[in-house]
Image (tube, grey):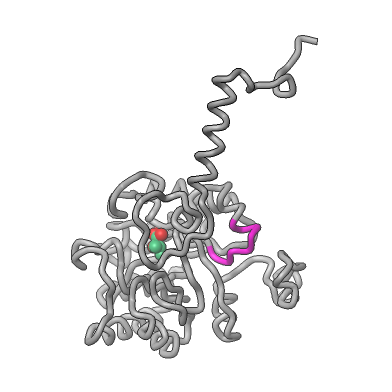
């Protein structure tokens, strides 16, 4: 690997690993993390500024999730978002990063019809948004679709377990892979790995099953509501930073209260405007 692929430390506590720190995260680095027993982090992102904050904070992977339907557009499910809408968010995120690997979801209905349709949609995300990989909610029947996209030269993250685009078929937001259903999750994951997926994202499955998957698969797993055995962990940023005032799933840990911070700030602004304290002299222009 060229020197260009490695950089100086990007933050304090990780100094020891600095020599190993890639300048730009690529899919093979995620594999190396797994091989070295090192964990990595992934957050959703939908706009350039937040993406830039997360990139500079060292988040290894940014996901332009179809959760944009929920958190950016206020929908109650992810099914409604279109390719054209998600492409705008994806392009914005790509514009905001210099280091993170950017992965975009393929929206519901844009890849399930045929392997050809999947390749066509994935190509649009690579060409028009400039993302580095795509994510597809997948199972046994869509293995050929994943294979076709990989064969077109596009890295695929396969998403199994609870797959929100199938929420109506799955009977709502429910933990998957319990008891006798565990085998199907493992079989699906192995088939998707054989199809060329560079990693497998597992959502809302028992922690023990994630441990079994990490052991069974060569490629890394990324967990959300799937316990601590996965190589990577992902959360929706509005949940983990406390912007979302809805009911949070059990698997979310809230690291900040952005809603409280923003509310305090905008109320201060409003009070200053009403009291005539803003703008001050220092915020005003003079004729001379
Ligand atoms: O769209 C999304 O944000 C996702 C995560 C929940 C993994 O798929």
Compared with 161, 239 (above or below) is above
Residue 284's spot in the image, x, y percent? 71, 19
- Which residue is at the front of the view, 97 or 53? 53
Question: Whereabouts is ligand 1, in terms of quadrant?
Answer: bottom left
Q: Which residues are magenta?
A: 54-61
Residue 91's spot in the image, x, y percent? 51, 49
In-image side of 271 versus 144 (left or right): right
Residue at 44%, 59% in the rendered image:
236
Residue 259's spot in the image, x, y percent? 48, 46
Residue at 52%, 60% in the rendered image:
255
In-image side of 145 versus 238 (left or right): left
In-image side of 101 versus 15 (left or right): left
Q: Residue reaching furthest right? A: 288
Quarter of the image for residue 194 reads bottom left
Residue 24's spot in the image, x, y percent? 64, 66
Query: Can residue 171 be seen in this snapshot?
Result: yes
Compared with 66, 32 (above or below) is below
Q: Does the magenta portion include 160?
A: no
Residue at 53%, 55% in the rendered image:
256
């Amino acid at each position: 690997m060229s020197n260009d692929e490695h950089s100086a430390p990007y933050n304090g506590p990780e100094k020891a690993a600095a020599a190993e720190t890639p300048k730009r995260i690529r899919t093979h680095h995620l594999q190396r993390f797994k091989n070295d027993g090192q964990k990595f982090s992934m957050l959703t992102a939908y706009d350039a500024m937040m993406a830039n904050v997360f990139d500079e904070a060292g988040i290894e992977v940014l996901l332009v999730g179809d959760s944009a339907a929920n958190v950016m557009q206020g929908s109650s499910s992810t099914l409604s978002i279109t390719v054209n809408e998600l492409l705008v968010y994806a392009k914005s995120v790509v514009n905001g990063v210099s280091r993170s690997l950017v992965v975009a979801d393929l929206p519901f209905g844009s890849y399930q019809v045929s392997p050809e349709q999947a390749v066509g949609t994935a190509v649009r995300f690579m060409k028009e948004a400039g993302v580095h990989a795509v994510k597809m909610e997948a199972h046994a029947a869509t293995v050929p679709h994943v294979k076709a996209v990989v064969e077109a030269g596009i890295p695929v993250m396969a998403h199994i377990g609870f797959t929100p685009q199938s929420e109506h078929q799955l009977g709502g937001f429910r933990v998957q892979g319990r008891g006798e259903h565990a085998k199907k999750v493992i079989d699906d994951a192995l088939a998707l790995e054989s199809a060329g997926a560079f990693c497998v994202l597992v959502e809302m499955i028992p922690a023990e099953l994630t441990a079994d998957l990490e052991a069974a698969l060569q490629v890394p797993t990324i967990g959300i509501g799937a316990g601590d055995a996965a190589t990577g962990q992902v959360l929706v940023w509005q949940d983990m930073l406390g912007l979302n005032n809805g009911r949070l799933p059990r698997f979310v840990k809230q690291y900040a209260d952005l809603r409280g911070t923003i509310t305090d700030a905008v109320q201060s602004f409003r009070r200053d405007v009403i009291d005539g304290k803003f703008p001050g002299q220092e915020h005003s222009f003079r004729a001379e």
